[in-house]
Amino acid sequence: MIVVVTPPTSEPVTLDEVTAACRLDATNQEPAPYAPIAILASIPAAGNVDNGAHRYLATYVTAAGETQAGVASAAVTVTDKTVNGQVVMTVPVGGALVTSRKLYRTLAGGSTYYFLATIANNTATTYTDNIADSSLGAGAPTTNTTGDPLLIMLIQAARQHAEQELGRAIMPQTLDAHFDEFNHCGFTLPPLNSVTSITYVDTDGTTQTLAANQYQVDAASIPARIVPAYAVVWPTTREQLNAVTIRFAAGYTTVPACIKNWMLMRIKTLWDGRDQLAKQLGMPVFEPSFIDGLLDSERVRCKL
């Protein structure tokens, strides 16, 4: 039995690649917000916003990413921050997929926008700026990395399907392989990157960690093999299910083009058929079967 401990942090194909393959446009992304409204605080108070003219803009953040910078506000000018150095903003609220918003501001008299603050919700409509130019952060994004949540789900589903078809871990991830005893140990889901640990339950019921010098790993074979070190025998384990656990890291450093191409074809087909009732009734949801041949060069055919 294989259990994913740490799932992949990225996917083999990007949202931009899928958007291009599906012939989609910006309507499948969260639109950038309209301009915030910025004015000096109505009750004068000393603050940290530097003297000079400032403009503001916002971005929307979703589970997939962040929009590009939205429309900028009109300029608001701080003439004496020791008297009124705070700016109150009316912040736009995004759609249902927006989880937070980020605010950006120019330096006094500047034209480049730098990170000001994150509003960690999609409900608050006001924000008071009391931050000096010297404390501003990175520049505002110029590209939109949000996307249709269905596309994001299809990318993950296509990668999982490819892993099932190939018997491989495609993206780097950490997994636990469980065995009832050492004599049945081996690996699936190549390519193997490293073995993190081997633990086992001894005859007394205590979990032990096997020292790395007690075993050797053949990572060149597909699937990889693990055997006792020279002149070493496997320890005796308690007679129970999953008495041995091998934690290992697996996945491609560079995903082969054939896998990425297969994923893009599959995602496009699923996207094109997303609204067809026939698909829901059990009819085929993939293109002609010869496309699966793209995976043949990476398919693991040997069995443990």
Image: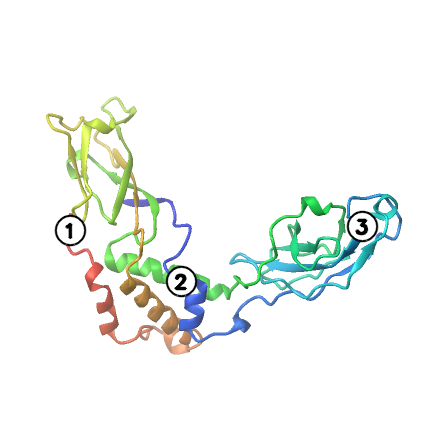
Q: Position of residue 26 (x, y in %)?
A: 54, 72
| Up-down relation of residue 46 to residue 121 (above or below) | above
Q: Position of residue 57 (x, y in %)?
A: 69, 60
Do callouts 1 and 2 mark residues in contact (Cβ within 8 Å)? no
Q: Nearer the viewer, mark 1 or mark 2?
A: 2
Q: Which residue is mark 1?
A: 303
| Up-down relation of residue 82 to residue 142 (above or below) | above
SS under mark 2: helix
- Real-space Cα separation, disc 1 to disc 2, in angstroms: 28 Å
Q: Which residue is mark 3?
A: 51
Do callouts 2 and 3 mark residues in contact (Cβ within 8 Å)? no
**Counting residues from the N terminus, which is met first, the one under dot 1 or under dot 2?**
2
| Up-down relation of residue 18 to residue 124 (above or below) | below
Q: Position of residue 45 (x, y in %)?
A: 86, 45
**Counting residues from the N terminus, which is met first, the one under dot 1 or under dot 3?**
3
- Residue positioned 73% across, 59% down in the render: 55
Q: Nearer the viewer, mark 2 or mark 3?
A: 3
Q: Which residue is mark 2?
A: 155
- Residue positioned 25% across, 60% down in the render: 165
- Label tally: 3
**Counting residues from the N terminus, which is met first, the one under dot 2 or under dot 3?**
3
- Real-space Cα separation, disc 2 to disc 3, in angstroms: 48 Å
Characterize the local packing of mark 1: few (<14), some (14-19) or many (20 or more) Cα atoms within 10 angstroms: few
Locate residue 101 relative to residue 177 in the image: left or right.
Answer: right
Characterize the local packing of mark 3: few (<14), some (14-19) or many (20 or more) Cα atoms within 10 angstroms: some
Q: Position of residue 203 (x, y in %)?
A: 22, 24
